[in-house]
Image (spheres, rainbow, N blue to C red):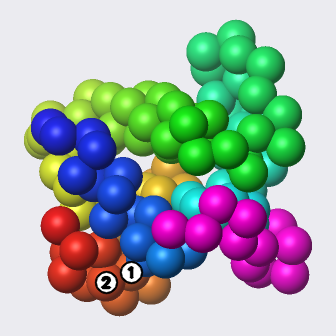
Amino acid sequence: MNWMVLIYALITVESSGINTAVGDYGKSIGCLQIQEGVIKDVNRIYTKEYTKMDRYGRHQSVEICKLYLTYWGSVYERNTGKEATYEVLARIWNGGPYGYKKEKTEVYWAKVKRHL
């Protein structure tokens, strides 16, 4: 898995590369449009101390994304016995830990796939 290929595609879809992007009425911040729940998850799972402001930093945003997707991708693999593909991970990023099951994330995946 080449994480940077996937994360670059996610950044392109989420914010067109704008580190200060704000979406979802202020709930999603930064180049990867990270919500507070993702930060809380990463901090809890990895005993990290990321803050809401870290979403504005590209380096921190990429780290948060990679940690989040690493964890939930491994949960997917454990639960299904299948490899977490770019599609599965992109849909988790868009729809939460079980986003790969949600029909609404299929459109998001189509956008991400165009940038891989």
Q: Which residue corresponds to mark 2?
A: 111
Q: Which residues are magenta?
A: 17-27
Q: Residues within 10 Å of mark 1 (few under 14, many from 20)?
A: some
Residue type indicated by callout 1: Tyr
Q: Are marks 2 and 1 in contact (CB under 8 Å)?
A: yes
Task: Identify which residue is drawn at 40% across, 64% down.
Answer: 10
In which image quadrant can residue 25 be found? bottom right
Q: Nearer the viewer, residue 65 or 104?
A: 65
The x and y percentages for residue 22 are 77, 73
Is residue 100 visible in the rendered structure shown here?
no
Q: Residue 80 appears at what percent x and percent y?
A: 21, 41
**Which of labels 2 and 1 is toward the front?**
2
The magenta stretch spans residue 11: no
Residue at left offset 43%, top offset 57%: 92
Residue 57 appears in the rendering: yes
For image coordinates 55% across by 74% down, the residue present is 15
Q: CA distance from mark 2 to mark 1?
A: 5 Å
Queried whether the magenta region covers residue 25, the answer comes back as: yes
Image quadrant assignment for residue 87? bottom left
Quarter of the picture holding the C terminus: bottom left
Please give left or right for residue 2 compared with residue 76 in the image: left
Q: Residue at x 50, y 50 (%)?
A: 97
Q: In the rendered view, tell whether residue 67 sits above or below residue 12.
A: above
Q: Tag 2, which secondary structure?
A: helix
* Residue at the top extreme of this rendering: 47
Reading the image, the residue beneath label 1 is 108
SS at badge 1:
helix
